[in-house]
Amino acid sequence: MSGYEGGAGYGGYGGFHSIGAILVLFILLVIISKAFLV
């Protein structure tokens, strides 16, 4: 989970750094929505 931590962080959005952050946020949103639905 420390992929973007060891990288440039939020200051330097590389190609897959921003995509990784978006994927993590999307997965968290899906888990939260499923938890609320259940």
Image (cartoon, helix red, strand yellow):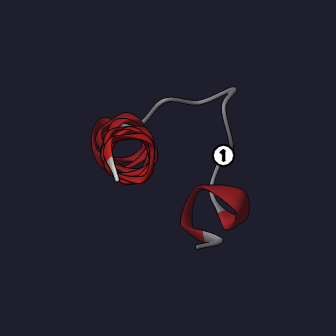
Q: Where is residue 12 drawn, in percent x and y?
A: 59, 30
Residue 32 placed where, x, y %? 46, 45
Residue 9, picture quadrant: top right
Please rate how many residues cluster around mark 1, counting C-alpha atoms within 10 Å: few if below 14, some from 14 to 19, many from 20.
few
Left or right: 4 with respect to 11? left
Q: Amino acid at mark 1?
A: Ala
At 62% across and 57% down in the image, what residue appears?
Answer: 7
- Residue under label 1, please give it: 8
Q: Residue at x 32, y 42 (%)?
A: 37
Residue 33 spot, x, y in % from top left: 36, 39
- Residue drawn where x is 48% and y is 29% of the image: 13
Front-lying residue, 34 or 1: 34
Where is the N terminus found, in terms of image quarters?
bottom right
Q: Is residue 2 left or right of residue 21?
A: right
Spot the residue most to the bottom.
Answer: 1
Q: Position of residue 20 (x, y in %)?
A: 36, 50
